[in-house]
């Protein structure tokens, strides 16, 4: 893979097809989850890059990308990236925070999007009511507010197990990768740093206007809130459907890459 830097904001991984006229399918953008980085796609990038141009950026303040110094919207960063690299319309594939940004891109920059694959999220305006989810998130936020990096990483990683499993039941390699990515990103931040993130508004109201196919690939043992928001999204858009991946929670692309990759491949062939 070739590692690129774009205006000190993004680090990109582009597979062999990026520089080849032989790329058979549409370009793909892979957007990672919050507090992780493009490394969560390490199983997908070489597979997808055989037939597609693949771009997998680190979002601002994540992985190797610089943090924000002024107000910004992640969706504008992704749009600028695609325009600067003359890429699009693309199929945008996102997990959790990345899924929310993918939906924002279809709402704000529809000309840049050919299709969406989302996992564990609906739009960038989430809501949480499930007791396990709210309790886990609260514990993670307390640890972050206290500046306890170890506790923050451990609390965050619980989302990989979901409400019906323990971390001991998750592939140790997946857990280790999540911990390392989360620690690398969280260590760049402090509890009292300015929050420059700007929201995209009325996302649920506008979701019915998304005119491209949308596939939700959810982990079957993810939290009910995460699954429910993704399923609400595909019910709202004109062309949407959802599948569940057994034996996976919030990161099905990492836990069951075989099933996730097959679902993505079928979606791409159907475009």
Image (tube, rainbow, N blue to C red):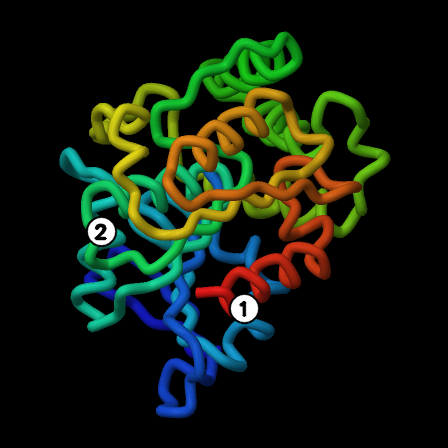
Q: Nearer the viewer, residue 262 or 17?
A: 262
Q: Which mark is residue 140?
A: none
Other residues around mark 1 within 10 Å, as few (<14) / some (14–19) / many (≥20): many
Q: Earlier in the sequence, mark 1 or mark 2?
A: 1
Q: Quadrant of the C terminus?
A: bottom left
Looking at the image, is 101 positioned above or below residue 139?
A: below
Q: Which mark is residue 110?
A: 2
Whether residue 67 is visible:
no
Residue 45 badge: 1
Q: Residues within 10 Å of mark 2 (few under 14, many from 20)?
A: some
From the viewer's side, name the closer residue of 202 and 153. Answer: 202
Q: How many numbered marks, from 0 up?
A: 2
Q: Is residue 257 visible?
A: yes
Residue 229: x %, y % from top left: 49, 26
- At x 46%, y 84%, the residue is 16
Res 21 quadrant in image: bottom left
**50 relative to 3, above or below:** below
Q: Please provide percent x and percent y for residue 49.
A: 50, 76
C-beta proximity under 8 Å, tags 1 and 2: no
Left or right of 237 in this view: 69:
left
Q: CA distance from mark 1 to mark 2?
A: 24 Å
Question: Disc 2 on helix, strand or loop?
Answer: helix
Q: Percent x, y for residue 69? A: 18, 39
Nearest the eye: 3 or 106: 106
In this rendering, position of residue 217 left or right of residue 4? right
Q: Is residue 257 left or right of residue 204?
A: right
Residue under the point 73% across and 31% down: 221
Residue 119 vertical placement versus 136 (above, below): below
Give the image quarter of residue 12.
Answer: bottom left
* Viewer-nearest residue: 52 or 69: 52
What residue is drawn where x is 24% and y is 41%? 107
Q: Residue at x 46, y 32 (%)?
A: 235
């Amino acid at each position: 893979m070739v590692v690129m830097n774009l205006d000190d904001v993004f680090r990109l991984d582009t597979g062999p097809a990026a520089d080849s006229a032989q790329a058979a399918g549409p370009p793909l953008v892979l957007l990672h989850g919050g507090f992780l980085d493009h490394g969560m796609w390490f199983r997908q990038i070489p597979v997808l890059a055989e037939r597609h141009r693949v771009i997998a950026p680190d979002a601002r303040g994540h992985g190797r990308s610089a943090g924000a110094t002024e107000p910004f919207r992640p969706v504008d960063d992704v749009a600028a990236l695609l325009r600067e690299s003359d890429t699009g319309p693309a199929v945008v594939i996102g997990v959790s925070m990345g899924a929310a940004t993918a939906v924002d891109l279809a709402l704000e920059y529809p000309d840049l999007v050919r299709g969406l694959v989302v996992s564990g999220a609906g739009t960038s305006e989430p809501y949480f009511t499930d007791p396990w989810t709210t309790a886990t998130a609260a514990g993670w936020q307390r640890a972050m507010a206290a500046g306890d990096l170890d506790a923050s990483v451990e609390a965050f990683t619980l989302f990989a197990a979901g409400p019906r499993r323990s971390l001991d039941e998750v592939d140790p390699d997946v857990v280790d990768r999540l911990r390392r990515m989360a620690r690398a990103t969280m260590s760049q931040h402090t509890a009292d740093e300015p929050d420059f993130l700007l929201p995209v508004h009325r996302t649920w109201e506008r979701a019915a206007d998304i005119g491209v196919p949308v596939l939700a690939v959810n982990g079957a043992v993810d939290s009910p809130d995460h699954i429910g928001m993704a399923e609400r999204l595909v019910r709202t858009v004109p062309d949407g459907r959802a599948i569940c991946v057994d034996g996976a929670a919030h990161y099905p692309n990492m836990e069951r890459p075989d099933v996730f990759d097959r679902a993505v491949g079928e979606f791409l062939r159907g475009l």
